Image: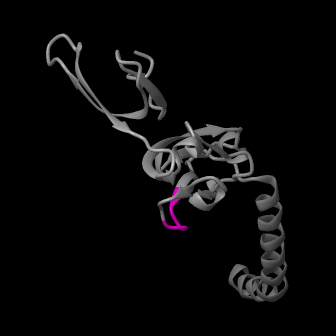
Amino acid sequence: SKLVYTPNAHTVVIALDNGETYDAVLQDIQFHPVTDNILHIDFYRLFEDKEIAMDIPVHIIGTSRGVLNGGILRRNRRKLRVKALPKNLPDFLEADITPLKIGGKLYVTALEGEDYKLLHSDNTVVVQIKTARTAIVDDEDEDEDELEEGAEAATTEGGDAPQGDAAEAPAQE
């Protein structure tokens, strides 16, 4: 039952009564419509020298600065299509979101491995941190914004302020 009710992809060894064993993966399950008992399970036989393509779940690890500052974690892909030999097929892929800030994205290229190939384009987004209304701007971004605002205020005060005072002074007299 652990194999049936888990999102992970597992390879299993099926032992027959005549002593033969086969490596396989769970392909399909049929449940009874009322009792939810398992009626039938289909397995897909694996060959050691033949690659297989499967949907492998993505586990998120780490804590993102963007999420801590109020951003929203959005999982665009919960599973990724992976092609590999059965012995190299991972049970899950780990996505580390620690370096992500608000507006940051984790692409499928960050999850590539030597033993398997991801069957997605390089610009596929797995996880992103979206801006929330109550999000706090990251410290580095805030410092840059303050510098820009300070420069704008200096040019505005230097050029426009005397004209505004001169225009207001005659109107008050």
Q: Residue 84 in the image: x percent, y percent?
A: 53, 52
What residue do we see at 50% from left, 62% from top?
Answer: 124
The answer to which of 66 and 80 lies nearer the viewer is 80
Q: Nearer the viewer, residue 150 or 134?
A: 134
| In this rendering, position of residue 150 left or right of residue 136 | right
Residue at 48% x, 32% y is 11
Q: Looking at the image, is 164 positioned above or below residue 114?
A: below
**From this viewpoint, is residue 77 visible?**
no
Q: Give coordinates of residue 170: x percent, y percent.
A: 73, 87
Residue at 53% over, 57% down: 118
Vertical relation: 60 (above or below) 49: above
Principal secondary structure, stretch drawn in magenta: loop
Place of residue 169 in the rendered image (x, y in percent of width and height, measured from the top left):
76, 83
Depicted 124 relative to depicted 23: above or below: below
Vertical comparison of 145 with 95: above or below: below
Residue interval drawn in magenta: 121-125
Q: Is residue 64 magenta?
A: no
